[in-house]
Image (tube, coloured by chain):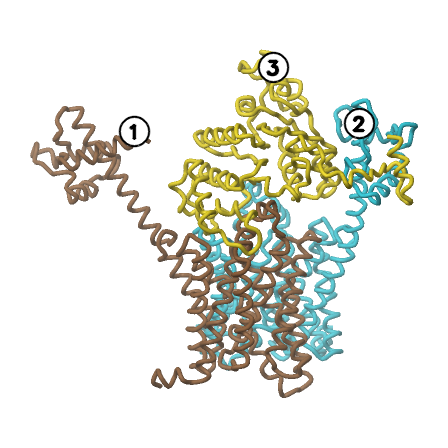
């Protein structure tokens, strides 16, 4: 600490307490052991704080849920990782390097409502768009991209809908198309914003199976999730967020009544159901009131 | 006038060529504007071209289309920036920003127009034709300019096709894979300004909005993919442009702009009604077909159920009872099914009115419907 | 006094402009807040078809029949737009852009074909002739009063009474149509009434200023006012003030430069909008940029305070240099530190940077608002 102070003091006008670290600039990798490392992140929109000084660390190969009440900054966290919203402070690294250098290793699934589904395009076409980032400027998608996209549609169980106009798909099918698009990005880190919102039960099962398959293949997933009841069934890692990180870690350690109460404040009622993993006191497993 | 002579006419040739260029460029670029829900931006940019035309005239001292178009491009782009600034940096919403910029730039144009007229130059006579367009005044040199602008715009759209498509469909995702979204969106707006410039001579500044909106809306009806939609929009634009311009050029006293716009509107109307799948007529027919199929299915199921309950595959059911069962008159449905050979009218108890039984085909169909319903 | 007014063409022109501006701004305030500005643009174009059709049927160039025709044209525009939107094949902005050019084109074509000698030629339709309004007069109380003044006076009175009498209902229907409906205020009917009055105002105004400049009078003064105030009442009054001032200044400028009077009046409303946009006390660009800059620094200070509090809660000083964890540049970190020190949020102790009691309070208030004692 003291040495850092001195180093800062030598740099002319800089305030000594700034603690300028010359080493940081040349250091090639930052926390390379983590799939996603968010440090001291603050995001403020129009003067309103959305995220306050949060640290998020996701080890590789886990399927992590981001859970918190409305307005907790869940979507903002994903957007801040992707550099889609300006950061007031803090930094983000993916496998040790900033997002700019890791772009092709990251796949992003926005909320389904983010696009106009009456756009004149087919399911296959949307999935091919997942390859655009890899193609770079000017190059057109060809046979190889088409094959990959068809395979991804197959993996989502909707290959027969490839030529369907996207407005004619059900909500669950649209979500599967979005996931197929993420699949063809062939990423290491998947960021998904509410992929299970408003989909039917079979689709939810298919999505979970796919995501777990990706995890088992060594990929890392960060999923904004809204249903507390299924958290411990689906996920193995949990980030509880409400403007700041309340708790994070393996689900069985983090999914406790105390943590959930602190995340949701007074909005949590007691749940009768017996919890599955024993991390909760039998009678105190909370749920969010609808 | 014989067709051959007519087509050999230089004016006609120019008019047709100009209309083709205009239709092509506005249809193609308008597609992106309509899909990005910025249809009315074209209206604002077109009105904002007026002061540019006047400035160009003041600069060149004559009705030199190249200079006028340059001025138009400049003020149209300025207007786009003004709209963007008002929306981003003030509390005005898009509609108020568009309306303010449209009317204010046009007002500056009107002031400049009267300023030019006040200088009593003989050469100013042509400027007001830019309000509604005057296809017959198109010169060969104008065509070169319009052709050049069109070629450039189409080249850029082809070159950046993939990028423009993604930014139009899903800007958030586009940003996440590293596309410069703001730059691409600004580029699209600038291209629409180019389309407006091509349209000055043919439709004029007041009605140009329709050329950016109508062909894409019509084209959207006929296809489910962006590539054919853009091509078709170009084609519809050409059709509207050529028909309107020809009528105007051959009928003295009719401004070109209104004719082209009415032709484009007619295409939209036809497309909204008639296009397969998305057409309103098509949808109404489909709804009727579905309604009928459902009525058929339900009636067959009723007959089949009765037959099963009575262990008689050809159990005769009374029509009045079927009416009561379905709560509506079943006579028409039964007649239709009889026509299809699914049911047969039988005389059972002559005093009690018509009776109906299932045919072999009817039983097969009812069984098939039933097992499909169970599978679902 | 009336005689002096009527004897002076300049005064008649300015009065005409002021009436157009007042009548329009009264409605424009609501149109802007309802996000219907472009519907005003559409209506003002479509009334041309109404005017031409009424003229072809009745040979009346102005008067009550024309106002009725305009009202019908306005309703047709809105109804057709809604019809198109309801098919769900066309988005609402595209629907507007399909309907009004078609109706306007039809109107202009009919003018070209049948009505070349009437005063409603396409030049007037588009640009207006405010300079000539005092030429066409009608006798009232023994005075020859310009027709435009009579009709505009009437329309202004109608609009003012509409807004004054139904102010509460309009306000509610604008901000919360669902609640207005639940309370039985018929927001849909109010909305149509507003748009019909817009059409009527447009037809009374177009001879003076033309259909495009009319849009400027409807939208720009209330838009400028909207950037200056939060109160609806003030917004309407300020809009009218802008319209009145613009008419007068626009007239003076137009006469001095010998250019279109209506055009110049509209341009001056634009100058008011520009001034409000740049220098408005609260929503102006300059105020906003200053505030944003200040806000950013403020946010950064709080970010630092929270950062230090987090470290404190973990029983340590910040582990890493600020430029590293917070990813701030030297200059930025220096600026933030200076600001924090100025507000007494941080201090230096032996081990490095630490929170003051005030800084700790500020950070706690953000993170744990429930723990802060009230008062």
Q: Which residue is mark 2?
A: C311
Tell me if label 3 and label 1 are in contact, CB under 8 Å. no
Q: Nearer the viewer, mark 3 or mark 1?
A: 3
Q: Can residue B77 be spotted in the picture?
A: yes
- Looking at the rendered structure, the secondary structure element under dot 3 is loop
Colour-to-chain, yellow:
A
> Percent x, y for residue C219?
64, 60
> Percent x, y for residue C213?
62, 68
Separation of residues labelled 2 and 3 (CA atoms): 29 Å
Quarter of the image with the N terminus of chain C is bottom right
Identify the disc placed on residue B374: 1
The residue lying at 45 percent from left, 62 percent from top is B233
Local packing at callout 2 (Cα closer than 10 Å; few below 14, some 14-19, many 20+) is: some
Horizontal relation, residue B192 to residue C301: left or right? left
**Whether residue C294 is situated above or below residue B234 in the rendered picture:** above
Horizontal relation, residue B370 to residue A171: left or right? left
> Percent x, y for residue B343?
15, 38
Q: Which residue is mark 3?
A: A280
């Amino acid at each position: 600490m003291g040495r850092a102070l001195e180093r800062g003091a030598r740099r002319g006008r800089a305030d000594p307490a700034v603690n300028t670290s010359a080493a940081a600039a040349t250091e090639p990798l930052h926390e390379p052991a983590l799939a996603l490392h968010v440090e001291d992140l603050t995001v403020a929109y129009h003067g309103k704080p959305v995220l306050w000084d949060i640290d998020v660390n996701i080890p590789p190969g886990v399927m992590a849920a981001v859970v918190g009440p409305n307005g907790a900054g869940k979507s903002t966290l994903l957007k801040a990782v992707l550099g889609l919203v300006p950061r007031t402070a803090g930094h983000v690294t993916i496998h040790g390097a900033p997002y700019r250098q890791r772009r092709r290793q990251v796949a992003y699934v926005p909320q389904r409502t983010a696009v106009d589904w009456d756009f004149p395009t087919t399911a296959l076409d949307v999935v091919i768009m997942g390859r655009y980032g890899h193609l770079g400027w000017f190059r057109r998608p060809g046979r190889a991209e088409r094959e990959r996209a068809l395979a991804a549609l197959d993996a989502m169980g909707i290959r027969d809908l490839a030529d369907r106009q996207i407005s004619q798909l059900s909500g669950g099918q649209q979500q599967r198309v979005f996931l197929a698009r993420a699949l063809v990005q062939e990423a290491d880190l998947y960021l998904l914003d509410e992929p299970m919102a408003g989909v039917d039960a079979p689709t939810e099962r298919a999505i979970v199976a796919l995501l777990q398959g990706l995890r088992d293949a060594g990929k890392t997933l960060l999923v904004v999730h809204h249903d507390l009841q299924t958290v411990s069934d689906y996920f193995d890692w949990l980030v509880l967020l409400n403007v700041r990180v309340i708790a994070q870690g393996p689900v069985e350690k983090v999914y406790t009544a105390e943590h959930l109460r602190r995340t949701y404040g007074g909005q949590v009622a007691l749940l009768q159901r017996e919890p599955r993993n024993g991390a909760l006191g039998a009678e105190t497993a909370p749920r969010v009131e609808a | 006038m014989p067709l051959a002579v007519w087509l050999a006419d230089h004016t006609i040739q120019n008019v047709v060529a100009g209309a083709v260029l205009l239709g092509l460029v506005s249809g193609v670029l308008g597609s992106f504007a309509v899909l990005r829900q910025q249809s009315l931006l074209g209206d604002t940019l077109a009105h904002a071209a007026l002061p540019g035309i006047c400035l160009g005239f003041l600069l060149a001292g004559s009705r030199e289309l190249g200079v006028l178009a340059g001025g138009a491009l400049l003020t149209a782009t300025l207007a786009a920036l003004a709209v963007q600034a008002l929306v981003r940096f003030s509390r005005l919403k898009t509609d108020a920003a568009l309306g303010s910029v449209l009317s204010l730039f046009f007002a500056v144009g009107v002031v400049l127009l009267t300023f030019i007229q006040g200088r009593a130059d003989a050469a100013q006579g042509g400027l007001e034709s830019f309000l509604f367009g005057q296809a017959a005044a198109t010169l060969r040199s104008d065509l070169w300019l319009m052709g050049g602008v069109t070629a450039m715009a189409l080249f850029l759209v082809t070159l950046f096709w993939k990028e423009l498509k993604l930014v139009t469909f899903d800007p958030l995702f586009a940003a996440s894979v590293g596309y410069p979204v703001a730059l691409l969106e600004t580029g699209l707006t600038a291209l629409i300004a180019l389309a407006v410039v091509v349209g000055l001579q043919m439709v004029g500044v007041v009605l140009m909005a329709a050329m950016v909106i109508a062909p894409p809306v019509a084209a959207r009806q006929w296809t489910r993919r962006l590539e054919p939609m853009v091509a078709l929009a170009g084609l519809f634009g050409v059709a509207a442009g050529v028909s309107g311009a020809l009528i105007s050029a051959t009928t003295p006293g009719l401004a070109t702009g209104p004719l082209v716009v009415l032709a484009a509107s007619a295409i939209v109307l036809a497309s909204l009604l008639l296009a397969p799948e998305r057409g309103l007529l098509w949808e109404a027919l489909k709804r009727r077909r579905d309604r009928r199929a459902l009525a058929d299915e339900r009636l067959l199921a009723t007959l089949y159920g009765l037959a099963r309950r009575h262990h008689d595959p050809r159990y005769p059911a009374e029509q009045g009872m079927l009416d009561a069962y379905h709560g509506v008159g079943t006579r028409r449905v039964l007649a239709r099914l009889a026509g299809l050979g699914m049911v047969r009218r039988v005389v059972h108890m002559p005093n009690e009115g018509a009776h109906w039984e299932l045919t072999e085909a009817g039983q097969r169909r009812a069984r098939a419907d039933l097992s499909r319903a169970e599978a679902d | 006094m009336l005689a002096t007014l009527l004897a002076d063409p300049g005064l008649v022109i300015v009065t005409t402009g002021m009436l157009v501006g007042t009548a329009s701004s009264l409605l424009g305030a609501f149109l802007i807040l309802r996000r219907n500005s472009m519907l005003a643009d559409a209506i003002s174009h479509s009334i041309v078809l109404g005017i031409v059709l009424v003229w072809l049927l009745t040979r009346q160039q102005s008067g009550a029949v024309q106002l009725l025709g305009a009202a019908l044209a306005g309703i047709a525009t809105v109804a057709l737009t809604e019809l198109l939107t309801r098919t769900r094949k066309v988005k609402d902005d595209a629907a507007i852009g399909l309907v009004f050019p078609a109706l306007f084109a039809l109107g202009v074509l009919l003018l070209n074909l049948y009505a070349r000698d009437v005063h409603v030629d396409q030049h007037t339709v588009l640009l207006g002739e405010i300079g000539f309004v005092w030429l066409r007069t009608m006798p009232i109380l023994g005075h020859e009063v310009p027709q435009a003044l009579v009709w505009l006076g009437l329309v202004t009175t109608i609009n003012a009474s509409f807004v004054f009498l139904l102010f509460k209902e309009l306000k509610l229907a604008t901000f919360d149509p669902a609640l207005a409906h639940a309370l039985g205020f018929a927001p849909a009917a109010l909305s149509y009434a507003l748009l019909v009055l817009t059409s009527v105002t447009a037809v009374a105004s177009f001879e003076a200023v033309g259909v495009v400049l009319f849009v400027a009078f409807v939208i720009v003064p209330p838009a400028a006012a909207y950037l200056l105030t939060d109160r609806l009442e003030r917004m309407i009054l300020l809009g009218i003030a802008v319209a009145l001032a613009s008419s007068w200044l626009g007239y003076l400028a137009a006469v001095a430069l010998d250019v279109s009077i209506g055009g110049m009046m509209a341009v001056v409303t634009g100058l008011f909008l520009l001034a409000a946009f740049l220098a408005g006390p609260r929503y102006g660009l300059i105020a906003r940029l200053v505030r944003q800059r200040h806000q950013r620094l403020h946010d950064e200070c709080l970010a630092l305070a929270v950062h230090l509090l987090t470290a404190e809660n973990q029983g340590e000083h910040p582990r890493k240099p600020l430029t590293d964890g917070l990813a701030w540049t030297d200059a930025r970190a220096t600026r933030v530190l200076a600001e924090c020190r100025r507000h007494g949020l941080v201090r230096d102790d032996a081990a490095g940077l630490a929170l003051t009691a005030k800084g700790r309070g500020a950070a706690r208030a953000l993170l744990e608002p429930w723990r802060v004692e009230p008062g």
